[in-house]
Amino acid sequence: RYDLRRFNAIGSISFDHPDPSIFTVLTSPSDTPGTANLDFVIFPPRWLVAQDTFRPPWFHRNVASEFMGLVHGAYDAKAEGFSPGGASLHNCMSGHGPDAATFEKASSADLSKPDVVADTMAFMFETRAVIRPTRQALEAEHRQRDYQHCWAGLQKHFRAP
């Protein structure tokens, strides 16, 4: 048994958003060096202090599949719409990232002050396998059928040099 509240979170103290693998608690190694069958990752309370950086998890696609859930508190990339007990699945190469409200807030944040992500515990299973939900999961009444709408209204901020 391991009390996840005792996990020592580390992070960038200068710039850039570190890879979430720094939050790995347990790994099930595979027969291929450098490739895990499964990583168990947590996102505990922590300080975000990186300068000139988009602090929440950024938009990305993975070769691995991510099954993520929230034990308690709020998740810093989906403040509006990821409730405790909820989970999300992003299979291999499925694009995902923060919701529109979080993206806008983080894009104009005052980076001279730290963000304190407090009273939270999110987890993620990352695997090289493709996760196939059961029919029961796909047809569950409590399933958030409009999940993809969290990205509606995203505004483009990039300006080419």
Image: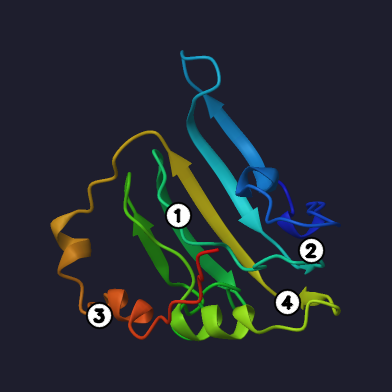
Q: Quadrant of residue 161?
A: bottom right
Amino acid residing under circle 2: Ala
Residue at (48% x, 47% y) in the render = 125
Res. 124 in view: yes
Give residue 59's position: percent from left, percent from top: 47, 61
Whole-angstrom CA distance, mark 2 to mark 3, is: 33 Å
Q: Circle 2 is placed at which residue position?
A: 50
- Which of disc 3 and disc 1 is earlier in sequence? 1
Q: Secondary structure at mark 3?
A: loop
Of residue 84 and residue 79, the one placed in the foreground of this image is 79
* Circle 4/circle 1 CB separation < 8 Å: no
Q: CA distance from mark 2 to mark 4?
A: 20 Å
Whether label 1 touches label 3, CB < 8 Å: no
- The three-letter amino acid code for the residue at tag 1 is His
Residue 133: x percent and y percent? 23, 53
Report which residue position mark 1 lands on.
60
User: Of the residues under marks 4 and 3, which one precedes in the sequence?
Assistant: 4
| x and y percentages locating residue 134 in the rendered image | 19, 54
Q: Which residue is mark 4?
A: 119
The residue under label 3 is which amino acid type?
Asp
Alpha carbon of mark 4 to alpha carbon of mark 1: how far? 26 Å
C-alpha separation, residue under disc 1 versus residue under disc 3 = 20 Å
How far apart marks 1 and 2 lie (CA) works out to 19 Å
Which label was assigned to residue 146?
3
Q: Earlier in the sequence, mark 2 or mark 3?
A: 2
Residue 79, visible in the rendered structure: no
Q: Is residue 84 above or below residue 153?
A: above
Q: Earlier in the sequence, mark 4 or mark 1?
A: 1
Select label 2 or label 4 by which is in front: 2
Residue at 39% x, 38% y is: 63
Q: Quadrant of the N terminus?
A: top right
